[in-house]
Amino acid sequence: AAAEARRFAEPAGAAASGFPAAEPPSDALEAFRKAALQEARSVLSEKCHDLRGFCEQLRDKALSEALSEARGIMAQKCTELRAFADKIRDATLEEVRLAVASAGSERC
């Protein structure tokens, strides 16, 4: 009879599972839970800090590499522009030389 009374006093889930009803946590268990939660928060905070630092390093490296690449491209374009300017100068000088030679031959 006592077992029957206990069975009806237990929640349906506990009786169906065959396990006794859960008891409220003891003070020691609650202190352990709080300490574990605090430790988990501390570890998570540390990992987030590490991740932020790693992201900053990646960003700095990417910016450095992009700046280096941009400098290389700019140097290449400056070289190409200088070569183009030299060609224009040479063509202009050739045209002037031809014009002077032509003008000199017309005088004679």
Image (cartoon, grey):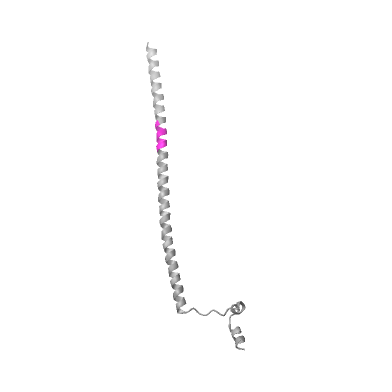
Quick check: 64 above or below 51?
A: above
Q: Which residue is rendered at x = 40% and y = 37% of the image? A: 75
Against 28, is 106 above or below?
above
Residue placed at 38% from the left, 23% from the top? 93
Viewer-proximal residue among 53 and 67? 53
**Residue found 62% across the figure and 78% down from its top:** 16
How many numbered marks have been drawn onto this rendered protein structure?
0
Q: Residue furthest top?
A: 108
x, y percentage for residue 4? 62, 86
The answer to whether residue 14 is left or right of residue 91 is: right
- Asked whether 96 or 79 is in front, the reply is 79
Tell me the quarter of the picture where residue 103 sits: top left
Q: Position of residue 86 (x, y in %)?
A: 39, 28
Identify the residue shown where x is 43% and y is 55%: 55
In the image, residue 81 lies at what x, y percent?
A: 41, 33
Nearest the eye: 69 or 94: 69
Residue 32 forms part of the magenta stretch: no
Judge from the rendering whether residue 21 lies leftward or rightward of residue 28; answer left or right.
Answer: right
Which residue reaches farthest bottom?
Answer: 1
- Pick the residue in front: 32 or 67: 32
Q: Quadrant of the C terminus?
A: top left
Residue 47 in the image, given as x and y percentages of width and height: 43, 61
Q: Is residue 16 left or right of residue 71?
A: right
**Residues in magenta, as a range:** 75-82
Locate the N terminus and report the quarter of the image it occupies: bottom right
Magenta span: predominant SS is helix
Asked if the stretch drawn in magenta spans residue 77, the answer is yes
